[in-house]
Image (cartoon, grey):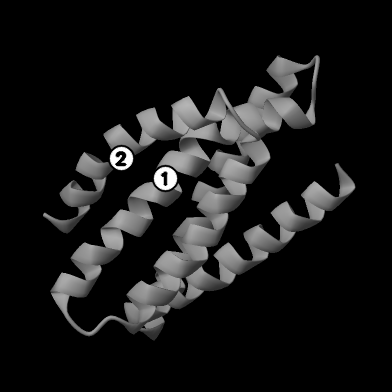
Amino acid sequence: MILSLCAALEVPLMIWFGWLATRGDHGRLVLVGATTSVAYYAVTWFTTDVWQVAAAQVLNAVVISAVMGVGISYFQDLVPGKPGAATTLYTNTAKVSAMVAGPLLGLAQHLGYRSAFAIGLALSVIGLAFLVAARRLH
């Protein structure tokens, strides 16, 4: 039920982020999503009640809407003139992350379910660092 709340919030947020993307910097919107991801995983790691997890779904919906909704446009901005290469890079990155997620979820099962949020937090911080570094280079 809680994940359904996130899905319900994603639709209007994706429309809103799509509108923002037509007027602004794609990289900044993805950076907002990455920063919100750090906040989401930090909040969920420390939750103690179900209502807190439900409230955190607003953050999760922002992450999904910003990163998944604007991410491909951001990659295309990074590789101008090669939209096919940018799209392939984006989709391959998603596939690699799914392959890495399997063993990490197995590790989280061994360590306890809260460790999944700690791992998500660590990976979000690393991803945010890469995005910040890429903005400085670009």
Q: CA distance from mark 1 to mark 2?
A: 7 Å
Q: Which residue is mark 2?
A: 10
Identify the residue shown where x is 79% and y is 26%. Answer: 79
| Camera-side residue of 115 and 134 | 134
Q: Which mark is residue 64?
A: 1
Which SS class for mark 2?
Answer: helix
Q: On the picture, is 13 further left or further right than 92?
A: left
Q: Residue 65 appears at what percent x and percent y?
A: 41, 40
Q: Quadrant of residue 128?
A: bottom right
Whether residue 82 is situated above or below residue 112 in the rendered picture: above
Residue 56 vertical position relative to residue 25 in the rendered view, above or below: below
Give the residue furthest to the right.
137
Amino acid carrying label 1: it is: Ile
Residue at image point 64% right, 24% down: 87
Residue 91 visible in the snapshot: no
Quarter of the image for the C terminus: give it: top right
Residue at 20 percent across and 41 percent down: it is: 8
Q: Secondary structure beneath disc 1?
A: helix
What's the mark number on residue 106? none
Decide: is 6 above or below 8: below
Percent of width and height locating residue 69 = 47, 33
- Residue 77, horizontal then vertical, whole percent: 73, 27
Q: Which amino acid type is shown beneath numbered disc 2?
A: Glu
Labelled pair 1, 2 in contact (Cβ < 8 Å): yes
Q: State the residue at coordinates (29%, 34%).
A: 12
Does 97 sit left or right of 10 as displayed? right
